Amino acid sequence: MNPPRLVFASLVIGVGLALAGWFVGRGFVQSRTTDRFVTVKGVAEREVIADLALWPMQIVATSNELSEAQAQLDRYEREILAFLARHDVDTTGVEHQGLEVTDRLANRYGDQGPVQTRFIVQQTLIIRSDDPQTVLSASQKMGELVEAGVVLSSAGFGPSEPTFLFTRLNDVKPEMIAEATANARNAAEKFASDAASRIGGIRQANQGVFVILPRDQAPGISESRQLHKTVRVVSTLDYYLQ
């Protein structure tokens, strides 16, 4: 080959290899840059008030005559309805559930001793109200039912206490998600500033799960027994660092 042509060909090959090396190196640097990110969490909380109350009352009557036990149960129900009306609880939402009749003489697995009363009749009343505050006030006067001779049982439903629910979570979700995301971004910007960098776009985002907690968080305090609650969401976001 002609020496000038050989020199030219070598020069072209050298320049090509140099450019290829530069592009490869540049791509590697960029790929490593995209791996630089920071993971931050943003928290948002709201104090809310329950908007629904469910109050189960299980009444129990006993007698050797089934009709007498049923009559006693009917009297208990009238006393409860009068009690609720007296304390401004709407009784139109009262439901009957779980009527149960037990014949102790027919129970072959029961006590083998003498039976004092043959029949046990149980009935559950469920009070449903969209005025939890009124229900809470009434529940604090349960002694009136005891004075009236109403026998309440805790079997199956636990204590005869109302349960307070917050059902409007969708109303607060958008605002809380926006607040949690803003708090996460502020944390990312602070981290980037301390690292002499700046944040880029979002690499990955996790909205988080909404949880409803008791406002007063202490041992033995149940969220469902509290009128006031705290709604919390923790969002997790990854931001690129530039």
Image (spheres, helix red, strand yellow):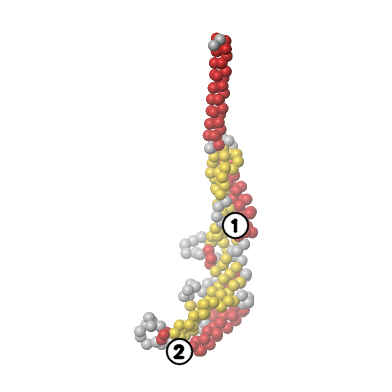
Q: Amino acid at mark 2?
A: Asn
Q: Give the residue at x 54% y 45%.
A: 40
Q: Position of residue 236 (x, y in %)?
A: 55, 48
Q: Give the residue at x 54% y 40%.
A: 37
* 3D distance between C-alphas at marks 2 and 1: 55 Å
Choose between 118 and 190: the one closer to the eye.
118
- Quick check: marks 2 and 1 in contact, CB under 8 Å? no
Q: Quadrant of the C terminus?
A: top right
Q: Can you tell which mark lies on residue 64?
A: 2
List the single residue furthest toward the top.
Answer: 3
Choose between 159 and 177: the one closer to the eye.
177
Q: Position of residue 209 (x, y in %)?
A: 55, 55
Q: Give the residue at x 59% y 76%.
A: 94
Other residues around mark 2 within 10 Å, as few (<14) / some (14–19) / many (≥20): some
Q: Is residue 29 above or below residue 87?
A: above
Q: Amino acid at mark 1?
A: Arg
